[in-house]
Image (cartoon, rainbow, N blue to C red):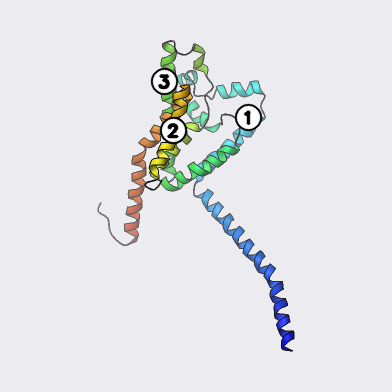
Amino acid sequence: MRRFLRQARRASRARQAPQASRARQVRRVRRAVRAGIVWITSAPGTYLWLAALFVTTVALHRMSPGFEEDFLRRRSTNIHELSTDPVRVLIASAFYIDGGTWAPYAVLYTVFHAPAEHWLGTARWLAVVALAHVGATLISEGVLSWAIRHGHAPQSAVNTLDIGVSYALAGVIAVLTYRVPKPWHLPYLGAILIFFGTPLIAERSFTDLGHFAAVLIGLACYPLTRVRGRRRNLDRRTDNGVRTPS
């Protein structure tokens, strides 16, 4: 009788083991899904922007090559469009991807933009994005305008196709230097300067100048990172019941 009971218990455990394993797998999947949802919803600016880029990328793929080029040129931050309607093209150019491939940007936005937005908050992250995008565009196009006037670039360069989100991305990558723990922030900064500085030295293109300018602008956004830190300290002290001086 005892032997029979032991065999019955072993058989019961054997039947329950796969069910328990499946239950653990389901719980892990649910936790991963919840973590992914929290990650995305806590960086709304990043993923709304990424969704908009997906829509515009799909739309561009449905256009004929000739129409697409004309369409993008009218939304390009080149000298001609900047002198005609600067606000419109500075905004519009940030919603189209240079090259037309969306998937790599989904990875880059998740690796760089989302952590920056989590850290800084949406408003300060957006400030860094705008400063890098607008500032680097104006710097690079300003230098290009100077080069055209002095005969270092052809007159046709005023209509250069210049769209994309890479200046904003470069600025955010740079500002994350202040998020990297010491002493790793110095190798991180060195890697950024090498990555964006080498093409500028080797090719000396105006796009490379814009990328390097965006990096410098991102580094100059250090005060925005400090404001966030002070606010967190104030919130923590208030939560602990300590009144802060006004």
**Which residue is more in the foreground, 221 or 43?**
221
**Kind of residue indicated by mark 3:** Gly
Q: Which residue in the structure is indicated by mark 1?
A: 60
Q: Secondary structure at mark 1?
A: helix
x and y percent of residue 173 in the render?
45, 38
Labelled disc at residue 198 = none
Residue 28 image offset from top left, x and y in percent: 60, 60
Specify whether residue 65 is in view: yes
Name the residue: 65% across, 30% down: 61
Helix, strand or loop at label 3? It is helix
Q: Residues within 10 Å of mark 3 (few under 14, many from 20)?
A: some
Can you name the residue that lies furthest to the top here? 151
Farthest bottom residue in view: 1
Q: Residue at x 56, y 56 (%)?
A: 34
Foreground residue among 159 and 144: 144
User: What amino acid is labelled 2 in the image?
Assistant: Ile
Helix or strand or loop: what does disc 2 sit on? helix
- Which quarter of the figure has residue 32? bottom right
Label 2 neighbourhood size at 10 Å, few (<14), some (14-19), many (20+)?
Answer: few
Indicate whether 200 appears above or below 121.
Answer: above
Q: Which residue is mark 3?
A: 142
Estimate the x, y position of residue 95 in percent, counting from the top left.
Answer: 54, 33
Foreground mark, 2 or 1, reads 2
Instruction: Using the numbered discs, state the Cα–Cα distance from disc 1 to disc 3 in whole angstroms.
Output: 28 Å
Q: Is residue 14 above or below residue 150?
A: below
Disc 1 crowd, CA 10 A, few/some/many (<14, 14-19, 20+): some
* Distance between mark 3 and mark 2 Cα atoms: 24 Å
Return the disc, 1 or 3, that comes first in the chain's sequence.
Answer: 1
The residue positioned 29% from the left and 60% from the top of the image is 242
Marker disc for residue 194 = 2
